[in-house]
Amino acid sequence: MDLATLDPVVWRLFRAGLAPSTERAYMSGKRKYLEFCTRAGLAPIPVSEHGLVHFVAFAVQQGLRHQTIRSYLSAVRHLQVSCGGGEPNFGGMPQLALTLRGVKREQGGQPKRTRLPITPAILVGVRRIWEQDGSNWDHIMLWAACCLGFFGFLRSGELVAPAEGEFDPGQHLSFGDVTVDNRANPSVLWVRIKQSKTDPFRQGVTIALGRTDMQLCPVTAMMAYLTLRGPGQGPLFRYKDGRALTRQRLVDDVRDVLS
């Protein structure tokens, strides 16, 4: 048997060993490391403790935080493994360990970014602003997404595609993932979550959301939007012009209305 014929299969399985979100994060780390090596005139593979401690210093100068730098070092480890160089022994690099500890000590006193919760009172205010435009398709869609995310305790990756053109019907929410107990007068809405950060093997789970008959009601919000959207392929949440609601667009729209 010619082992070269199995190379595509090996590579496919090797890539499948990482969750898509982890692979995207590693790509950022690998780009930053390769940028550093190019500017420093160093060979990126095999990695060396000398090169890594200077990469850490470079990352600090770029304004990166300790946690991000550690994630980038994991990406460098994966880079060497993918090149067939074996796993680097980071545990046997005491200078690297002390350098990372120094980064953590220096940054420990810096203020952390405050992330405030979206409360029911804030959601009521959001709804009031979006309703000022009457039957605005985009605002009805955004309100449905916010209600579904809030009452379903969903991460953004469970709610929308990560970016334009990255919608995958096998992973992300589509029209067929939402069902109700009664189309004429629904009281319960079921949503099939096909994959999530805590479900790497994509076993999926179905969550049930009940009608509240109050200002904040996921069933009412979703039914209003689904009536506009209608059945069809593609992401569950999309703007009137057909663009998909992505994580960044969701963040931007919510920030805009909050301001």
Image (tube, grey):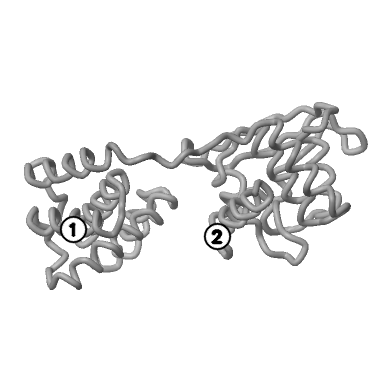
How busy is the neighbourhood of tag 2: few (under 14 within 10 Å), some, or many (20 plus)? few
The residue depicted at 21 percent of the width and 52 percent of the height is 77
Q: In 3D space, how far apart are the residues under numbered discs 2 and 1 (Cα atoms)? A: 29 Å
Regarding residue 82, the answer to whether it shows in the image is yes
Q: Secondary structure at mark 2?
A: loop
The label number, if any, that marks residue 55 in the structure image: 1
Tell me if 214 is positioned left or right of 113 in this view: right
What label does residue 184 carry, if any?
none
Which quadrant would residue 147 be assigned to in this image?
top right
Kind of element beneath mark 1: helix
Task: Report the residue at 21% width, 66% height from top.
Answer: 36
Q: Percent from the top left, x then y, of residue 228? A: 85, 53
Type of the residue with mark 1: Phe
Residue 158: x percent and y percent? Answer: 57, 43
Q: Position of residue 114 (x, y in %)?
A: 47, 38
- Can you say which quadrant of the picture contains the N terminus? bottom left
Determine if residue 1 is in view: no
Residue occupying the point 65% across, 53% down: 256
- Say which amino acid is labelled 2: Ala
Q: Nearer the viewer, mark 2 or mark 1?
A: 1
| Labels 2 and 1 touching (C-beta < 8 A) | no
Give the residue drawn at x 81%, y 55%.
229
Q: Nearer the viewer, residue 159 or 194?
A: 159
Q: Total of numbered circles in the picture?
A: 2
Residue lying at the far right of the rendered structure? 184
Q: Which mark is residue 163?
A: 2
Considering only vertical position in the picture, is 38 above or below 147? Answer: below
Horizontal side of 193 relative to 79 (left or right) equals right
Give the percent coordinates (x, y) of residue 181. Answer: 82, 32
Q: Specify which label sits upstream in the sequence, 2 or 1.
A: 1
